[in-house]
Image: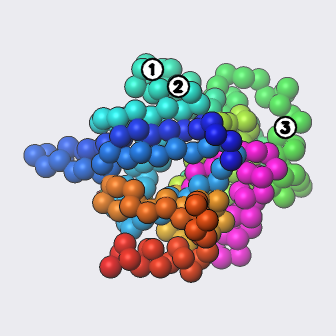
């Protein structure tokens, strides 16, 4: 990993107001992802994983603390500027693919360009390359309902990378797939990270999925409570499961 952090959270706190009750979803979280890293976030249900991912991607605002994305402190940007950073610098992969049903695979992959007001034609080659990368060379004209779940998720991965984002954020990307399709997606993410020097942050419940990452960060009750995969600690499935068992106890 390069020393340079693509994404940094400093003392990030998020509270939700529920009537008279304050729910503290994240508590003074410090966290960074370096260029070219594949990092997994794990933790029990309700520990704040999705909240953290949404804040890091500029989809929601922190209550306190600072998030710096691609060198830009988000608290100093207007909403429009955050939207622009999100569109140009971040790719998103969701559990349920979120493809547009009326568009072909190729059109779905091109969608972030269209949303950003760019013309698609100059990117035709890149769309082709991404279709090849995700193993859908001959499926570019298929609509989502003509693709399997695993194939739809591969379209979503290609879409996440179309803008050459600084970082790709994935929330349970294999959560809706059988184990074989899930493995294919994880191998693809790992390979993309290595071959395209991409940076990926993935939330997952699944120890096996997390073991594909270079490093695993564990959240509990809105706080980072454990790391694996740095300082020589391995992030084998076994090691990850042991930490999770401790957190869920
Ligand atoms: N919009 C919201 N309004 C109020 N509370 C919320 C909201 N979103 C999340 N929370 C609360 O914040 C905490 C963290 O939620 P979050 O969705 O980040 O958890 P998670 O780790 O992603 O869980 P899961 O594994 O079930 O997806 C939970 O206690 C949740 O109830
Ligand atoms: Mg979640």
Give me the residue at 30% from left, 48% from top.
27
Instruction: Read off the residue under disc 3.
Output: 126
Q: Nearer the viewer, residue 63 or 181?
A: 63
Q: Earlier in the sequence, mark 2 or mark 3?
A: 2
Q: Nearer the viewer, residue 228 or 41?
A: 228
Residue segment shown in magenta? 176-202
**C-alpha distance separating marks 2 and 3:** 27 Å
Q: Nearer the viewer, residue 204 or 68?
A: 68
Residue 12, placed above or below residue 212: above
Residue 23, x across and y down, in percent = 22, 51
Left or right: 124, with 229 as reference point:
right
Instruction: Read off the residue under disc 2.
Output: 72
Question: Magenta part mainly helix, strand or loop?
Answer: helix
Residue 24 at least partly seen = yes
Give me the residue at 87% from left, 44% from top.
129
Q: Tags 2 and 3 in contact by the CB under 8 Å rule?
A: no
- Look at the image and say whether residue 130 sits in the magenta stretch: no
Residue 173, x across and y down, in percent = 59, 59
Depth check, mark 2 against mark 3: the one in front is 2
Crowding around mark 2 (Cα neighbors within 10 Å: few <14, some 14 to 19, many 20+) is some
- Residue positioned most to the front: 231
Mark 1, ligand 1, within 8 Å: the answer is: no
Q: Could you say whether the residue bearing mark 1 is in a helix, strand or loop?
A: loop
**C-alpha distance separating marks 2 and 1:** 8 Å
Instruction: Read off the residue under disc 1.
Output: 77
Residue 61, x across and y down, in percent = 37, 35
Left or right: 222, with 139 as reference point:
left
Location of residue 178 (image quadrant): bottom right
Q: Tags 2 and 1 in contact by the CB under 8 Å rule?
A: yes
Give me the residue at 39% from left, 56% from top.
224
Residue 209 at least partly seen = no
């Amino acid at each position: 990993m390069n020393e340079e952090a693509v994404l940094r959270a400093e003392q990030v706190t998020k509270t939700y107001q529920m009537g008279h009750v304050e729910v503290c979803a994240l508590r003074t979280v410090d966290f960074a992802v370096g260029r070219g890293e594949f990092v997994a976030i794990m933790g029990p249900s309700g520990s704040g994983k999705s909240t953290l991912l949404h804040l890091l991607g500029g989809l929601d605002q922190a209550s306190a603390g600072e998030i710096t994305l691609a060198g830009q402190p988000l608290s100093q940007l207007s909403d429009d500027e955050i939207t622009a950073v999100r569109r140009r610098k971040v790719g998103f992969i969701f559990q349920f693919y979120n493809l547009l049903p009326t568009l072909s695979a190729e059109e779905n992959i091109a969608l972030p360009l269209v949303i950003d007001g760019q013309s698609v034609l100059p990117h035709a080659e890149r769309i082709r390359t991404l279709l090849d990368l995700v193993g859908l060379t001959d499926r570019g004209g298929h609509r989502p309902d003509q693709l399997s779940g695993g194939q739809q998720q591969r379209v979503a991965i290609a879409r996440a990378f179309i803008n050459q984002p600084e970082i790709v954020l994935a929330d349970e990307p294999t959560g809706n797939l059988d184990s074989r399709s899930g493995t294919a997606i994880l191998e693809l993410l790992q390979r993309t990270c290595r071959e395209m020097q991409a940076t990926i942050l993935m939330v997952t419940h699944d120890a096996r999925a997390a073991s594909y990452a270079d490093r695993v960060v564990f959240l509990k009750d809105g706080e980072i409570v454990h790391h694996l995969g740095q300082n020589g600690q391995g992030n084998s499935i076994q090691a990850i499961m042991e930490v999770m068992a401790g957190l869920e106890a």
